[in-house]
């Protein structure tokens, strides 16, 4: 079996690092893209210490030329790109009335346009060969926005729109390049240590919280199966379904609960550095996990069921046939 070449953006820490590790564990050679050089090199070193192959390539995904050049460099060093994972993101915790135009612009450039630029770079290498897979890392917040994260929610909404449009075009062209999207729940990542915030207390992911390895397993699975979209965690499914049927009621519920659920009891330090404009991990290795290990779940029953729904469906069908047969025998 040929060795896969995989590109992961936002790979210096958190979910991106967990994704890179998951591919490396399966024998892939992984190109790591992010701004934080120390984190990138630490990720590469951890992969290589386990016998894997990694290539750290400092890149700001908001720069389209840098992303395109990174793709060319990866192909020169590692060979044809098989899988490209768009994971890089930034966010701002703030009421809309306190947001600044440049903060919306920057969040959009990284979280939305960064994925667009990554997709364009991947398509340039994949379309001529008529093979390859692009994985978009989305969020439940791309379907259901919440207060205090308007810039991030809008960027993830936009990514869904872009991805759906491109998918139709690939189908029209009968392309064998695959496109899939993984919608994430709240994850225990270091993002909450360095996100820009105007909240009075430290930001936290909205419970239930999952470890980043749960999301990484979903991304790996989506990259190797013909699934349009994968939802991670029951909370993701609940948010999407509730928004489809009772959006007004959900507006009121989130207005009442989402301010408190996104903050811990610890006061925020307004002078701490954030990563909106430049990485805060330039001199340190931040790892995969954030500070919520005691609250985070290592698995998701919903995700397991989603990834095994064909087998579950077959089992239910078999059980139904058996029940019918037994019923006839009894009668």
Image: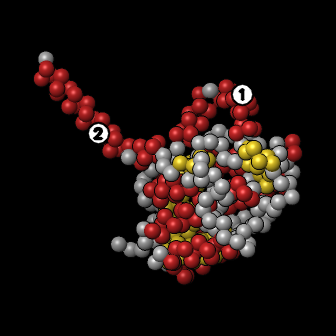
Q: Write the residue at 60% across / 79% down.
A: 73
Viewer-proximal residue, 322 or 6?
Answer: 322
Q: Quadrant of residue 224?
A: bottom left
Label 1's element? helix
Numbered mark located on residue 97 in the image: none
Q: Position of residue 86 (x, y in %)?
A: 60, 60
94 w.r.t. 110: above or below: above
Residue 178 x, y percent position in the rendering: 48, 58
Q: Secondary structure at mark 2?
A: helix
Q: Which residue is mark 2?
A: 315
Picture residue at 66% right of the left edge, 55% below the top: 291
Mark 1 closeness class: few <14, some 14–19, many ≥20 residues within 10 Å: few
Q: Quadrant of residue 121?
A: bottom right
Q: Residue at x 54, y 82 (%)?
A: 77
Q: How many marks?
A: 2
Tell me if 88 is positioned left or right of 203 in this view.
Answer: left
Q: Which of the marked residues, 2 or 1, is nearer the chain's N terminus?
A: 1
Q: Is residue 81 left or right of residue 259?
A: left
Residue 252 shows which numbered tag? Answer: 1
Left or right position of 36 against 314: right
Quadrant assignment for the C terminus: top left
Measured along the vertical axis of the image, is residue 250 above or below residue 206?
above
């Amino acid at each position: 079996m040929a060795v896969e070449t995989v590109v992961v953006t936002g790979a210096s820490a958190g979910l991106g690092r967990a994704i890179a590790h998951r591919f490396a564990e399966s024998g892939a050679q992984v190109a790591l893209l992010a701004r934080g050089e120390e984190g990138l090199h630490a990720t590469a070193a951890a992969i290589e210490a386990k016998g894997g192959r990694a290539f750290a390539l400092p890149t700001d995904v908001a720069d389209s030329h840098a992303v395109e050049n990174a793709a060319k460099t990866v192909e020169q060093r590692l060979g044809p790109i098989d899988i490209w994972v768009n994971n890089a993101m930034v966010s701002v915790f703030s009421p809309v009335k306190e947001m600044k135009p440049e903060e919306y612009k920057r969040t959009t450039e990284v979280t939305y346009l960064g994925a667009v630029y990554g997709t364009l770079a991947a398509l340039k290498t994949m379309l001529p060969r008529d093979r390859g897979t692009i994985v978009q890392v989305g969020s439940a917040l791309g379907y259901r926005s919440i207060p205090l994260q308007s810039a991030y929610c809008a960027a993830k909404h936009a990514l869904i729109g872009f991805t759906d449009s491109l998918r139709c075009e690939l189908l029209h062209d009968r392309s064998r390049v695959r496109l899939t999207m993984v919608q994430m729940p709240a994850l225990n990542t270091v993002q909450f240590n360095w996100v820009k915030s105007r909240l009075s207390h430290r930001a936290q992911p909205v419970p239930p919280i999952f470890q980043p390895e749960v999301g990484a397993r979903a991304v790996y699975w989506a990259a190797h199966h013909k699934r349009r979209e994968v939802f991670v965690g029951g909370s993701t499914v609940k948010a999407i379904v509730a928004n489809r049927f009772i959006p007004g009621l959900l507006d009121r519920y989130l207005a009442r609960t989402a301010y408190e659920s996104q903050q811990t009891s610890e006061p925020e330090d307004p002078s701490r550095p954030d990563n909106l404009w430049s990485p805060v991990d330039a001199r340190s290795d931040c790892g995969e996990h954030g500070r919520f290990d005691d609250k985070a779940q290592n698995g998701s029953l919903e995700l397991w069921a989603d990834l095994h729904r064909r087998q579950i469906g077959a089992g239910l069908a078999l059980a139904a046939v058996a029940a019918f047969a037994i019923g006839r025998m009894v009668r």
